[in-house]
Amino acid sequence: MYRTDIFAQYGLEFPKTWDEYLDTARALKAANPDVYIANLSPSEIGQWAQEIQQAESSWYGVDDDSWTVGVNDEGSKLVAERWQTLLDEDLVTTEQMWTPEYWALVNSGKIATITYAAWFPSLIAENAAGTSGNWAVAAMPKNAGSENSGDSGGAAVIVLKNTKNAEAAAKFASWLNGSDETQDTLITVGGLFPSTENGLASEALLQESEFYGGQVINEVFIDSAKNTPNTWVEGPNYGSIQTALLDEFAKVVNGQETFLEALDIAQAAAIADLKSRGLSVSE
């Protein structure tokens, strides 16, 4: 999501690659030091997750009957170096998301882009109504040699093992997530982005958005969903890894360490936590 008026004012094109993104950030700072390419929130793990998934990284893997941990793998290091550059060159603000201070930055035109999930455009419209017509949605910048997008957030509807009415619950879950009727309702009324194939094919997604200058923004998200790698693996101490990373990212923003150092610390913490649970880890 980007401010078309800011890009037009300074004669900038929206970047298609992350290398171009860094160049655009530098050009924007040179044109107006009070406007930043983005806000890098140290407390928002989703923004990190979407970029490492794009780089085909995963916090977990499986090696025979053991877990592997990839918090500091090559894709994560690639993203860490990018974030470090943005931070070191003062190309981003570092306000915590969801705060009044963050939305003040959005409303005042201090940040030119927000890279986030398909559920975020409606939140901008709700919290920055005065900027209507000044936004557009483009594909997430790509890594060199790749067409990958990334994924952030999402929810699951599950049937618990000990539920009393498992068959009925399963039928409900199937209806909720698979019927054309519910997909259209979830999209048009709930504002959700679907994970099902019939949901992606729903006409309800293809509505013009007045806030985004009449753009059919979900066309971008549909295309991105088709280009998200399937390399991500969920593991048993996801929350612990998340906490470890966010604790270290706060130190990075305060200048106490680098993002690369933060990854190594979180990697060690994740392995130690898995072992403390009695789980086998292949290092």
Image (cartoon, rainbow, N blue to C red):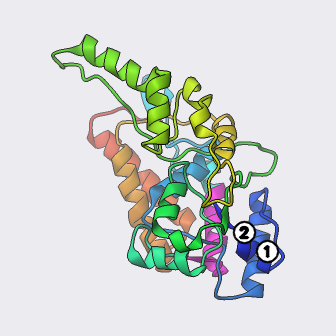
Residue 222 or residue 256, whichever sits in front: 222
Task: Say which of 9 and 206 sits in front.
Answer: 206
| Figure check: 208 above or below 96 | above
Dot 1 amino acid type: Ala
Question: Disc 1 designates what residue?
Answer: 8
Q: Which residue is drawn at 80% across and 51% down?
A: 144
User: What residue occupies the far top of the structure in this picture?
Assistant: 167
**Closest to the observer: 267 or 171?**
171
Q: Quadrant of residue 165?
A: top left
Q: Main secondary structure of the magenta part?
A: helix
Q: How crowded is mark 1: few (under 14 residues within 10 Å), some or many (20 or more)?
A: few
Give the number of callouts: 2
> Which residue: 32% across, 40% down?
275
Per the image, the residue denoted by label 2 is: 4
Is the residue 67 above or below the residue 142 in the image?
above
Which corner quadrant of the image does residue 135 belong to? Answer: bottom right
Mark 1 and mark 2 in contact (Cβ < 8 Å)? yes
Q: What stretch is highlighted in magenta?
A: 78-93
**Percent of width and height locating residue 105:** 52, 78
Picture residue at 59% right of the left edge, 43% below the top = 57
Q: Of helix, strand and loop, which one carries label 1?
A: helix
Assign a secondary structure to mark 2.
helix
Task: Give percent across and percent down for residue 62.
Answer: 49, 29
